[in-house]
Image (cartoon, helix red, strand yellow):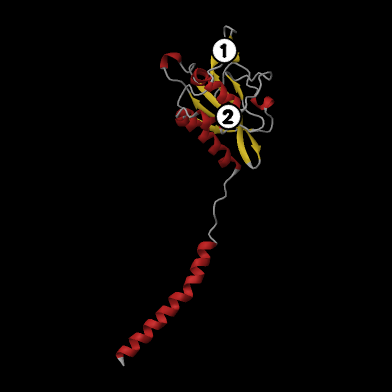
C-alpha cells in the first residue's frame, strides 16, 4: 500500500511539472529583446573602422566606405567642399601602387599636403589611439579649435561620431588636443563612412 501511494504521488508530481513547462516556455519567449538602435548601428561601424585602423588593416577600413559615395578626407576641422570623395577600390589601389596624393593644405604654411596613403593615415587619421579615446561622442562636438567646423553644413542631417584626446603633454596646456570624426550615411539598411575628419589646434 505504501509503495502504491509513493507511485501515485510521483505520477502527480510528473504531471504537475509537465503542465508548468509550457507557461514557463511562454514566459521566456515573451521576454522583451532589446532592439538595436540607429546609434548602436552607427557606433558599431565606427568601432569596426577604428579597430581596422589600429591594426593597419586597410582593407577592413575600406570596407566601411560608402559603396556609392566613397569617403572625403579632411586633415582639419574645416572641410574643403572641393575635395573629392574617394572610393574604396581607389583608396586600396593608391596603397598598393604607393601613389602620392594631394589631401589639402598644411595649416600655417599653406603648402599642399602631398603624401602617400599610409603616412597620411599616421599623421591625419589615426595619429592617436582613438579606439581607446579619452572621450567619445555621438552627434556632438568635443574638440573646439580656432578653425571653422563646417561638418554640419557639409553633411546636413547626417550622423557623426567623435573620438577625442584633450592633450598629451602638460607643457602645451591642451593645445595638443586631437580629434577624429566619422560621418555616416545609410545605404541599403546599413551605415557607411562618407567623411573622415581629423581636427586639432590650428594657427
Does residue 8 lie above or below 39 as drawn?
below
The quadrant holding residue 42 is top right
Classify mark 2: residues with Cα within 10 Å, few (<14), some (14-19) or many (20+): many
**Can residue 201 be seen in this snapshot?**
no
The label shown at residue 20 is none
Q: CA distance from mark 2 to mark 1?
A: 22 Å
Q: Nearer the viewer, residue 87 or 194?
A: 87
Q: Position of residue 200 (x, y in %)?
A: 53, 18
The one of 111 and 158 positioned closer to us in this rendering: 111
Give the structural element (helix, strand or loop) at label 1. Answer: strand
Residue at x-position 44% and y-position 78%: 16
- Of residues 170 and 101, which is closer to you in this image? 101
Q: Which residue is mark 1?
A: 114
Q: Are marks 2 and 1 in contact (CB under 8 Å)?
A: no
The quadrant of the picture occupied by the N terminus is bottom left
Q: Which SS class for mark 2?
A: strand
Residue 70 placement (x, y as % from top left): 63, 28
Q: Nearer the viewer, residue 157 or 50?
A: 50
Q: Residue furthest bottom?
A: 1
**Within 10 Å of the Cα at label 1, are there few (<14), some (14-19), or many (20+) other Cα atoms?**
some
Q: Which residue in the protein does label 2 denote?
A: 182
Image coordinates of residue 5 in percent, x first then y, are 34, 88
Left or right: where 34 falls relative to 186: left
Report if residue 40 is visible in the image: yes
Q: Mark 2 or mark 1: which comes first in sequence?
A: 1
Residue positioned most to the left = 2
Q: Is residue 70 above or below residue 24?
A: above
| Mark toward the viewer: 2 or 1 | 1
Location of the C terminus by quadrant is top right
**Rendered image quadrant of residue 112:** top right
Amino acid at each position: 500500500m505504501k509503495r502504491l501511494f509513493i507511485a501515485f504521488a510521483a505520477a502527480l508530481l510528473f504531471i504537475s511539472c509537465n503542465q508548468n513547462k509550457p507557461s514557463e516556455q511562454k514566459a521566456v519567449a515573451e521576454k522583451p529583446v532589446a532592439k538595436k538602435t540607429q546609434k548602436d548601428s552607427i557606433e558599431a561601424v565606427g568601432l569596426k573602422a577604428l579597430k581596422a585602423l589600429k591594426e593597419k588593416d586597410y582593407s577592413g577600413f575600406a570596407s566601411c566606405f560608402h559603396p556609392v559615395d566613397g569617403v572625403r578626407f579632411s586633415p582639419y576641422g574645416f572641410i574643403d567642399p572641393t575635395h573629392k570623395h574617394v572610393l574604396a577600390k581607389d583608396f586600396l589601389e593608391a596603397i598598393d601602387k604607393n601613389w602620392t596624393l594631394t589631401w589639402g593644405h598644411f595649416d600655417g604654411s599653406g603648402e599642399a599636403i602631398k603624401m602617400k596613403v599610409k603616412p597620411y593615415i599616421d599623421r591625419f587619421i589615426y595619429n592617436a589611439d582613438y579606439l581607446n579615446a579619452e572621450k567619445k561622442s555621438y552627434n556632438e562636438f568635443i574638440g573646439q579649435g580656432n578653425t571653422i567646423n563646417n561638418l554640419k553644413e557639409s553633411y546636413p542631417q547626417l550622423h557623426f561620431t567623435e573620438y577625442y584626446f584633450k592633450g598629451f603633454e602638460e607643457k602645451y596646456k591642451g593645445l595638443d588636443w586631437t580629434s577624429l570624426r566619422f560621418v555616416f550615411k545609410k545605404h541599403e539598411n546599413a551605415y557607411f563612412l562618407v567623411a573622415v575628419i581629423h581636427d586639432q589646434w590650428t594657427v
